[in-house]
Image (tube, rainbow, N blue to C red):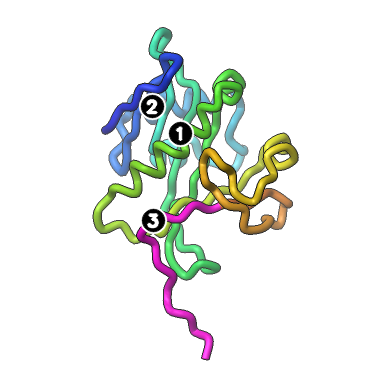
Amino acid sequence: MQQILLSGDVEIQLNWPVIPEAVQQQAIDLWALHNALPPEVDPRDRASQVVAIATDQASGEALAIATVQPEQMGWVGQPMFRYRTFAVADARLRSISVQMVNCVFDFLNRIDGRAEAGLYMEIENQFLMQHQNEGTWFESRCSFIGYTPQGWHKRVRFFPNATLPDSNLQ
């Protein structure tokens, strides 16, 4: 576990791959309070993927949750961490999500022997897709790589030591 104090009395706690039960329950409670998960997603399964939780130090209230799931990405030929985040409205206004993705990226990048090449995310937020439509986001350094079948933005950020697999082009 690693804890990072952000300005404004917000703390980010990083846990992975072992996620304490109390952190998993905080995530489940936050998602339920805000109806944040699609009905087909089991909250317990998603809670087992929590990598970071941002909390208000004064109240102890959860403000944002980030999850990662190692996943083989056929289009890149190697595994990536599928990154998901949910933040309450106040946290979005305070750019906590951007700070979380950077903390998670740095945290995962320091794992020795990991196979994953970086973070992959799908942006479902219409506001972000319309108003933060730069090819590479300056603060998080996540780059646009295309659209999902649903029309969401796909973004990636590779770890500095990531290498491309051999091409099967002749």
Q: Which mark is residue 72?
A: none
**Label 2, residues with CA under 10 Å away: few <14, some 14-19, many ≥20:** many
Q: Secondary structure at mark 2?
A: strand
Q: Secondary structure at mark 3?
A: loop
Q: Which residue is mark 1?
A: 100
| Residue in view at x 69 percent, y 44 percent | 133
Residue 74 drawn at (x, y percent): 52, 68
Quarter residue 107 falls in: top left
Residue type, numbered disc 3: Pro
- Reply yes or no: does residue 120 show up in magenta: no
Residue 134 drawn at (x, y percent): 66, 46
Q: Which mark is residue 160?
A: 3
Magenta stretch, main secondary structure, is loop
Relative to residue 61, is residue 100 depicted above or below?
A: below
| Residue in view at x 49 percent, y 52 percent | 157
Residue type, numbered disc 2: Ile
Relative to residue 138, is residue 154 depicted above or below?
A: below
Q: Which mark is residue 12?
A: 2
**Label 1, residues with CA under 10 Å away: few <14, some 14-19, many ≥20:** many
In the rendered structure, which segment of residues is drawn in magenta?
156-170
Residue type, numbered disc 1: Met
The Cα–Cα distance between marks 1 and 3, rounded to whole angstroms, is 18 Å
The Cα–Cα distance between marks 1 and 2, rounded to whole angstroms, is 7 Å
Label 1–label 2 contact, CB within 8 A: yes
Mark 3 or 2, closer to the camera: 3
- Of label 3 and label 2, which has the lower sequence position? 2
| Residue in view at x 36 percent, y 22 percent | 5
